[in-house]
Image (spheres, rainbow, N blue to C red):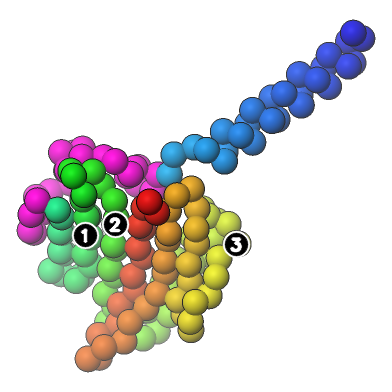
Amino acid sequence: MKKGNKWALMSLLLLANTLCHAQTAEFSTPEGYRWGMTKTQVLKINKGEPTKSENDFLYYLNTETMNSLLYKFSDNQLVAITKKYGFETEDDLISDFEKYKKQLIALYGVNYKEISFETFEWIYRNTRIMLFNSYKDDKFKVFITYEKIK
């Protein structure tokens, strides 16, 4: 085999290996959480004591910002994460909502569905990721959820 053909073949094999790995690689959040982590592993990554801890969840609430994190477990394995961000004004919510949307597009691509107004869904590596906002009782919130697809 000629040197040029060997180089082309090796390049194709490397590309195929990279593409296969990209399709099957394990999901991880930007913070490093992966499906199947135990509560102990999640506690090591997340700083501070949880506000509430039960068998099937860990809950963290920042009372100054009203931001919260909820980690759900099944058989002591991480299966869902919900991030909630609270805002003082609608303008702050709109600004940060767009920022979060751009970040999620950068991480998970443009192949998302707009399920309803201001509700977006990505399906990425055995995970459903959702971004949506809520206006209730003059409280402005943005939610980002990660849920393992069985």
Q: How many numbered tags mark residues here?
A: 3
Q: Which secondary structure lies at badge 3?
A: loop
Query: Horizontal and vertical percent for residue 35?
Result: 33, 44
Per the image, the residue denoted by label 1 is 70
**Image mark for residue 83:** none
Q: Residues within 10 Å of mark 3 (few under 14, many from 20)?
A: few
**Label 1 – label 3 distance at C-alpha:** 26 Å
First along the sequence among labels 1 and 2: 1
Residue 50 placement: quadrant: bottom left
Which quadrant is home to the N terminus?
top right
Residue 51 placement: quadrant: bottom left
Q: Is residue 17 visible?
A: yes
Residue 131 vs 28, above or below: the answer is below
- Between 11 and 72, the one nearer to me in the picture: 72
1 and 2 marks in contact (CB < 8 Å): yes
Residue 105 vs 86, above or below: the answer is above
Looking at the rendered structure, the kind of residue marked 1 is: Leu
Q: Which secondary structure lies at badge 1?
A: strand
Per the image, the residue denoted by label 3 is 111
First along the sequence among labels 2 and 3: 2
Looking at the rendered structure, the kind of residue marked 3 is: Asn
Left or right of 138 on screen, residue 143: right
Asked whether 36 falls inside the magenta stretch, the response is yes
Query: Horizontal and vertical percent for residue 78?
Result: 26, 47
**Image mark for residue 81:** 2
Asked whether 24 falls inside the magenta stretch, the response is no
Q: Residue at x 22, y 91 (%)?
A: 137
Q: Residue furthest bottom?
A: 137
Q: Residues within 10 Å of mark 1 (few under 14, many from 20)?
A: some
Looking at the rendered structure, the kind of residue marked 2 is: Ile
Left or right of 40 on screen, residue 26: right
Q: Which residues are magenta?
A: 28-55
